[in-house]
Image: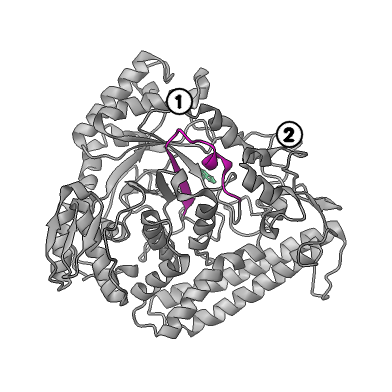
Amino acid sequence: MDTIKEAPCWLTFLPGELPQTSAPEETARWELAHAGARCPLRVDEAMGDAFEIGEDGAITGGRTGVLYGAYRLLMARAAKEPLPRGVQRPRYALRMLNCWDNAEGDIERGYSGRSLFFEGGRFAYDPARMRTLGRMLASVGVNVLCVNNVNVLGPAWRLIEDGLPELARLADIFRAFGVRLMVSIDFAQPLRHGIPTADPLDERVQRWWAEQTDKVYAAIPDLAGYLVKADSEHRPGPFAYGRDHADGANMLARALAPHGGALVWRCFVYNCQQDWRDRKTDRPMAAYTHYAPLDGRFDENVILQVKHGPFDFQVREPVSPLLLAMKQTRMAVEFQLAQEYTGHQIDLYAMPPMWREVFDDMGAERVQAIAAVGNLGRDENYTGHPFAAANLFSYGLFAWDPDAEPRALLSLWGRLTYPNFSEREQRSLCDMLMESRAIYEQYTAPLGLCWMVCRDGHYGPGPDDYEYAAWGTYHRADRDGVGIDRTASGTGYLMQYPDWLRERYEDAARCPDALKLFFHRMRYDDVLSDGRTLIQRIYDDHFEGVERAEAMAKTLRALPLPSPDREVALERMERQLANAREWRDQVNAFFHRYSGAPDAHGRPLY
Ligand code: GCW
């Protein structure tokens, strides 16, 4: 019998013992019985993921629905929240977690230790931790888990070949939690089998994928599908054969279609070999430029997966115009729980307020699925910082119901994770999380400018690190001003948006301050909406960001966090403070040296 030492993270509402079940409805029964809840279950297969909790506590739902219902009921009881009434149905059928784990055991942009799944080129996992992870995911409704990195490196291509028996064993474990596996595949995989090309229109290539996919589904009949990163950052793709991405995606989708699998194709395609002297190519325009003209050409089971912003998970970006452009294609929006550009799970950065903004601008109906890059690893607490679990928890519930309010999600996480806290302590934890992103934003790159991060690892400041590099990510600061004009008179990026968003950002004076430097080039003495000059606003934000981080540290010290969360959180907070001060001083010094402008309050600039 697998047991875990103590229930980790928000799973405090479940017993330490783990279910040894193989189907979701059995798991639901097991969890309810072991939690001492006498609730009858009625399985109505047609309900799928949906469930309803009756007045008498009876749960009716599909096979996965009753499991979600059971977790929601137990959670609501533990958090002393009212039970959801009426039929609860997820907004999206695919609520995906993409892990960027490499077969060798390291994780691309992973900040919670090594891989939970792999080591030394093969699967190597603790079955109890897999079940715990299954519980974590199912308890918040995540139902697709892609286990390997979208960059299919080293022996990872073997997953869908001789790795199949092991992949099938892992799928068995997660099946009990209603979680289906997905795999990232290498577009050029046929080249390993004596086929001289990976051209999607070549019959030998099509046949290889169809036959291989039949073998995959013989081993794992409910695999969710394939995830593909092609023609992006040196990954192979259809461009090499003069084909477009509809040709590439459809070829793979046709291999999956007979099995009901989805082909999830990432749209993170841009020129990563740009010359910094070139001012015409504007990287945020890339995804729309590549994909918008292909609207209507993708097969039914293709889903285009688009990062929420046009750059790459920066601290603040506008919504990607591609998400608003493709009306005849199934789309998924992609978030990144791993804090690559947002503090590496050292600095606090709770994401729900950011997702809320994205969805408010995009509209939940614009996408048919949702994905997030995972933040998991082998660390005892799974997410490095114990509070980073709040992002995974909230993501699942948000994917189920994108109308959810950030505060409600974070506060539910807090009450489940730290049931020992008083109401006042719960509130201060929640306040801290709610403002964590704004604070991080204040002490890093100013007003939507992006890309002032240290190039080596993406933690800490590096104001000029990307300025003369090939990545297409420039701020163009000089002695007079900073930023790129992305309006019609500049690069034209803004023209990719529908009118109402174009109007919001077009006029430099009316463009919201938070994105001012994303859309406009400004002089240091330009005046912002609150009457401050740009340069003074930059200085003020950086001083204030550090002060607010220091106030957060004080709040954190006063919370009765249990061990080891307390030690981990306090130690990380010290690193966050050091990071914040470094950002403040480097960004302020950088702009001071260009502008020559003193700080109105005489604070130190170096
Ligand atoms: O931001 C970049 C990351 C890469 C990542 C890529 C992507 C998986 O730095 O590490 O590769 O995004 O999303 O494909």
Left or right of residue 280: residue 129? left
Q: Quadrant of residue 376?
A: bottom left
Q: Where is residue 365 drawn, in percent x and y? A: 44, 46
326 magenta-colored: yes
Left/right placement of residue 536 relative to residue 222 reads right
User: Which circle marks residue 280 in the picture?
Assistant: 2
- In the drawing, does residue 16 fall left or right of residue 384? left
Q: Which residues are magenta?
A: 318-336
Q: Residues within 10 Å of mark 1 (few under 14, many from 20)?
A: some
Q: Residue at x 23, y 57 (%)?
A: 51
Q: Please indicate, yes or no, whether residue 194 appears anywhere in the rendered image.
A: no
Q: Which residue appears at 39% of the width and 45% of the height?
A: 369
- The response on whether ligand 1 sits within 8 Å of label 1 is no
82 falls in the magenta region: no
Judging by the rendered image, the residue that carries numbered circle 1 is 297
**What label does residue 279 carry, if any?**
none
The residue lying at 77 percent from left, 55 percent from top is 509
Q: Does 27 appear above or below 544?
A: above
Given residues 322 and 163, the one toward you in this image is 322
